[in-house]
Image (cartoon, rainbow, N blue to C red):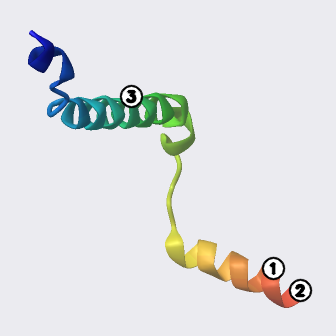
């Protein structure tokens, strides 16, 4: 009976599963919160790079 209580071999795996599940939940919540930000936006990387270069040269 004591051996059964001291057996902790599966504890590490369970902790990793809980950690991974927590990361997934946080990622889903972040996607839901920022969904409006990404919807309806035209993502133009060329224009964004030009804006950054312009701002850096002015500062």
Frontmost residue, 54 versus 56:
56
| Residue 49 x, y percent position in the rendering | 61, 79
The image quadrant of residue 24 is: top left
> Label 1's element?
helix
Circle 2/circle 1 CB separation < 8 Å: yes
Which of the two labelled residues, at mark 3 and mark 1, occupies the earlier sequence position?
Answer: 3
**From the viewer's perspective, is the residue at label 3 or at label 1 nearer?**
3
> Which mark is on residue 15?
none
Direction from residue 45 to residue 6 in the image, left or right: left
Disc sitting over residue 25 in the figure? 3
Q: Residue at x 54, y 29 (%)?
A: 33
Question: On the image, numbered disc 1 is attached to which residue?
Answer: 55
Q: Residue furthest top?
A: 1
Residue at (50, 60) in percent of width and height: 43
The answer to whether 3 is drawn above or below residue 43 in the figure is: above
Q: Secondary structure at mark 2?
A: helix
The residue most toward the front is 2
Q: Which mark is residue 58?
A: 2
Q: Quadrant of the C terminus?
A: bottom right
Q: Residues within 10 Å of mark 1 (few under 14, many from 20)?
A: few
């Amino acid at each position: 009976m004591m051996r059964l209580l001291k057996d902790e071999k599966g504890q590490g795996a369970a902790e990793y599963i809980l950690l991974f599940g927590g990361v997934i939940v946080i990622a889903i919540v972040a996607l839901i919160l920022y969904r409006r930000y990404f919807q309806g936006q035209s993502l133009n990387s060329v224009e964004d790079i030009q804006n950054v270069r312009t701002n850096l040269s002015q500062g």
